[in-house]
Amino acid sequence: MPDSTHPPQLDEAPKHSSSGCPIRTTLRTIAADLKGTRPHAEVTTADRLTLAREAANGCEHRERALLLRMPHITWAATRGEYGLILDRTSWGA
């Protein structure tokens, strides 16, 4: 019978979630989609708004939070390029 004064075994250590920030995760999901589906197609400001709205699943707070972190598209960008930008942006979210 183990003594109750012994430290916990490694497998008894508390398990912490590594999911991170939900906005960070959502940005990475959007980025993966952009890079994986038609990466050479153009992405526009309207696409940025649509991506945030769809990813927010009807939550206005989440949509605003995403749009605050998704850079405005002021140049001719491809979906793949914007995906890379969102990947980089997600690290600061």
Image: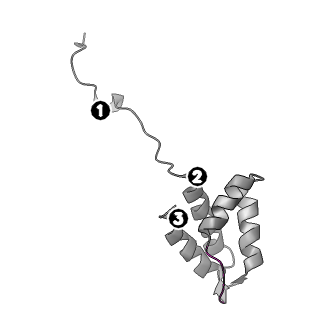
Hey, which residue is sitting farthest top in the picture? 1
Q: Residue extending furthest bottom?
A: 76
Q: CA distance from mark 2 to mark 1?
A: 28 Å
Please, what is the three-letter code of the amino acid marked with disc 1? Leu
User: What secondary structure is found at the residue carrying circle 2?
Assistant: helix
Membership of 21 in magenta stretch: no
Point out which mark residue 22 bears: 2
64, above or below 6, in the image = below
Toward which corner of the image does residue 29 lie, by quadrant?
A: bottom right
Q: Which mark is on residue 61?
A: none
Task: Name the dominant secondary structure of the magenta segment.
Answer: loop
Marks 2/3: CA–CA distance: 10 Å
Q: Residues within 10 Å of mark 3 (few under 14, many from 20)?
A: many
What's the residue at 74%, 54% (across, down)? 60
Query: Which residue is painted at 59% across and 56% down in the image?
Result: 23
Front residue of 76/60: it is 60
Q: Are marks 2 and 3 in contact (CB under 8 Å)?
A: no
Residue visible at 47% across and 42% down? 17
The residue indicated by pointer 1 is 10
Residue at (28% x, 27% y) in the render = 9
The amino acid marked with disc number 2 is Pro
Residue span colored magenta: 71-75
| Horizontal relation, residue 5 to residue 28: left or right | left
Residue designated by label 3: 90
Q: Percent position (x, y) of residue 77?
A: 64, 86
Q: CA distance from mark 3 to mark 1?
A: 32 Å
